[in-house]
């Protein structure tokens, strides 16, 4: 199992980013996928999750209406579209596949 995140960057407050997680080594459509994040000095927290075929999604209250999780099973990739970014969104963002598989993370920094 390999999960490789990309798309993290430094962005100004109010800006947008799209994170990608390219998966390999397993049947991608057989698993729900999630994005987590971990800010400095804080515990890792669930940001969003998506069902196997994308019909069901769930979001942390702090990102609802700003972030959108999606997936392309033909490309073995899960995405996180992040809009209206705030300084408190600054964190390392991780892709997760149950049970226990994590990507290496991608840094998102929201700052002026």
Image: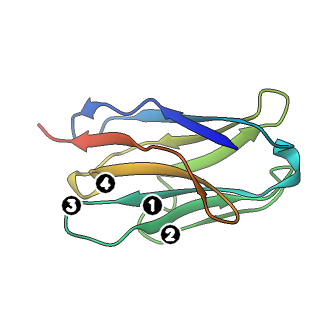
Q: Which residue is mark 4?
A: 89
Labels 1 and 4 touching (C-beta < 8 A): yes
Given this view, does label 4 or label 3 mark the residue nearer the observer? Answer: 3
- Alpha-carbon span between mark 1 and mark 3: 18 Å
How crowded pointer 3 is (Cα within 10 Å; few <14, some 14-19, many 20+) is rated as few
| Label drawn at residue 28 | none
- What residue is shown with label 2? 60
Residue 63 - label: 1
CB within 8 Å, label 2 to label 3:
no
Which dot marks residue 40? Answer: 3
Question: Is the residue under label 3 in contact with that under label 1 (CB below 8 Å)?
Answer: no
Mark 1 or 4: in front is 4
Tell which circle, 1 or 4, labels the residue nearer the N-terminal end.
Answer: 1
- Cβ atoms under marks 4 and 3 closer than 8 Å: no
Mark nearer the N terminus (2 vs 4): 2
Considering the numbered disc 2 on the image, is that residue within a helix, a strand or a loop?
loop
Residue 6: x and y in percent read: 47, 30
């Amino acid at each position: 199992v390999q999960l490789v995140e990309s798309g993290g960057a430094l962005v100004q407050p109010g800006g947008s980013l799209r994170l990608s997680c390219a998966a390999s080594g397993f049947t991608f459509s057989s698993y729900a996928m999630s994005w987590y994040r971990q800010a400095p000095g804080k515990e890792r927290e669930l940001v969003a999750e998506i069902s196997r075929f994308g019909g069901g999604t769930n979001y942390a209250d702090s990102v609802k209406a700003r972030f959108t999780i999606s997936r392309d099973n033909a490309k073995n990739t899960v995405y996180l579209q992040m809009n209206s970014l705030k300084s408190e969104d600054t964190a390392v963002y991780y892709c997760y596949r149950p049970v226990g598989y994590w990507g290496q993370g991608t840094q998102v920094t929201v700052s002026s």
